């Protein structure tokens, strides 16, 4: 069931981040796109992977603007 939306704790595990880190990124607007369904927050695997891929760097001096 690849297209199932992930809960925040599942999304954090997918990204290798802490649950609280992902929550802080939601508040600041710096994290992956998410869906707000009523009181629930959900993530698609595609959005999580896209967000991670956008942060791929070849060196520590590779500075690209983060959108």
Image: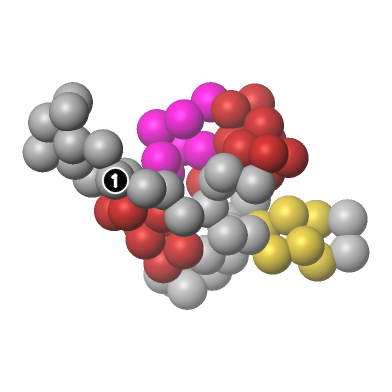
Residue 53 percent coordinates (x, y): 29, 53
| The N terminus sits in image quarter | bottom left
Residue 46 percent coordinates (x, y): 41, 67
Residue 51 percent coordinates (x, y): 41, 54
| Residue in the picture at 61% in, 38% down | 25
Residue linked to disc 1: 64
Number of marks in the image? 1
Instruction: Report crowding for label 1: few under 14, some 14 to 19, many 20 or more residues within 10 A (C-alpha).
Output: few
Please provide the residue range marked out in magenta.
Answer: 12-19
| Residue in the picture at 52% in, 65% down | 44
8 in relation to 62, above or below: below
- The answer to whether residue 39 is left or right of residue 10 is right
User: Residue pushed farthest right?
Assistant: 38
16 falls in the magenta region: yes
8 in relation to 21, above or below: below
Q: In which quarter of the image is residue 8?
A: top right
| Colour theme | secondary structure
The answer to whether residue 39 of the structure is visible from this angle is yes
- The answer to whether residue 38 is left or right of residue 40 is right
User: Residue pushed farthest left?
Assistant: 58
Which secondary structure is most common in the magenta stretch? helix
2 in relation to 50, above or below: below
Provide the secondary structure element on which disc 1 rests: loop
| Residue in the picture at 26% in, 38% down | 63
Q: In which quarter of the image is residue 49?
A: bottom left
Q: Quadrant of residue 5?
A: bottom right
The answer to whether residue 9 of the structure is visible from this angle is no
- The answer to whether residue 33 is left or right of residue 60 is right
| Residue in the picture at 37% in, 61% down | 50
Residue 37 percent coordinates (x, y): 81, 66
14 falls in the magenta region: yes
């Amino acid at each position: 069931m690849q297209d199932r939306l992930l809960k925040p704790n599942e999304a954090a595990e997918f990204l290798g981040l802490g649950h609280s880190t992902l929550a802080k990124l939601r508040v600041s607007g710096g994290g992956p796109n998410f869906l707000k369904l009523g009181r629930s927050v959900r993530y698609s695997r595609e959005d999580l992977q896209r967000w991670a891929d956008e942060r791929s760097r070849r060196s520590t001096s590779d500075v690209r603007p983060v959108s």
